[in-house]
Amino acid sequence: MNETLKRAISGAVYIVLLLVSILYSTETFFILFGIFLIITIYEFCNLVQVHKVFPIIFGTTLYTAVTLVSHYSASTAEIINKLLNTNIKIAINIQQLNIVLLVVAIVVSTKCIIFLFYDNIQKISTSSKYLYLIGYIILPFVFITKISFGVKDYNPKIIIGLFILIWTNDTFAYIVGKSIGRNKLFERISPKKTIEGFVGGILFAILAGYLISKFYIQASPEHSEKSVIIWTSIAVIVGVAGTIGDLIESKFKRIAGVKDSGSIMPGHGGILDRLDSVIFVAPIIFLFYQILNYVS
């Protein structure tokens, strides 16, 4: 089997699995991304050379606990309220938990960006490895599940729309860069990325965001204009932050001296290679939603 066919088949399987799990139910969505989290932790531990058992146990436990507390609090409220005797305390605790997790994720994301510009770093300290593991790998998966709920109930269109924007940005960044790219974006980390491709990816992502807001999300007439603004803004965030996420993963791979984070997807590499953009974007999109909710 040639490389192109192998890549096409594994990519198709990945997309079908992703869409089916997201559309089938909330639980299948949570389970699939829990599995993705375990694989991603395993791959990242290989990249930075740390033991895998504790990070996998810790990451799975945190992901499961936060998911249950955040999205199934209604079903457990009666039990908790017997101890707390009020619903208000539960809501406050969840909101405080979101803030704490978001602050940690944003701080680590900022550290990742700074790390990207350090030319002379060829070895990562042990403390930084575990910090990256928590804020760059584990917490983004938590925020992916939170994003899918928007401001109310589980809405598969939100997470599918986000993936469409990421795929659009990646695809057209490659096409535009391959066609007219002349100026390198970050040559020492990713020699193939160009400024022209970067801009082209964002422009096509904005177009995709507009089409998503008009024909997929199907907001009510009075909210149509607001929906367009929201989704085109998300497209810009995806274009910028997604590219940064891709570069950051490339930096980790360059230090590790490997081409891919893993080999679970023939022709594509590992799960981290497929999700490097979305995991960096997720906390920022969640923050964006919180700001929108606060403003409205």
Image: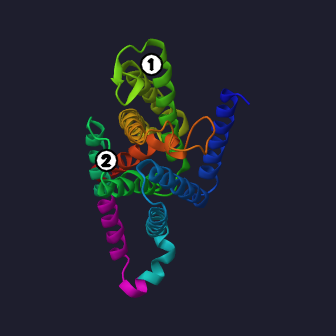
Q: Residue 134: image x %, image y %?
A: 37, 57
Residue nearer the viewer, 188 or 240: 188
Q: Is residue 146 above or below residue 183?
A: below
Please report the residue visible at 48 percent of the width from the left and 30 percent of the height from the top: 170
Q: Is residue 14 left or right of residue 64?
A: right
Please report the residue visible at 30 percent of the width from the left and 49 percent of the height from the top: 291
Main SS of the magenta part reads helix
In the rendered image, is residue 218 in sight?
A: no
Q: Residue 279: image x %, image y %?
A: 43, 47
Residue highlighted by disc 1: 177
Residue nearer the viewer, 22 or 101: 101
Q: Quadrant of the N terminus?
A: top right
Q: Secondary structure at mark 2?
A: helix
Q: Residue 129: image x %, image y %?
A: 35, 54
Residue nearer the viewer, 259 or 186: 259
Please report the residue visible at 62 percent of the width from the left and 50 percent of the height from the top: 23
Residue highlighted by disc 2: 109
Q: Is residue 94 magenta?
A: yes
Q: Residue 175: image x %, image y %?
A: 50, 20
Task: Report crowding for label 1: few under 14, some 14 to 19, many 20 or more residues within 10 A (C-alpha).
Answer: many
Residue nearer the viewer, 49 or 280: 49
Magenta residue span? 81-102
For badge 1, the amino acid type reads Gly
Dot 2 or dot 1, earlier in sequence: 2
* Quarter assignment of residue 237: top left
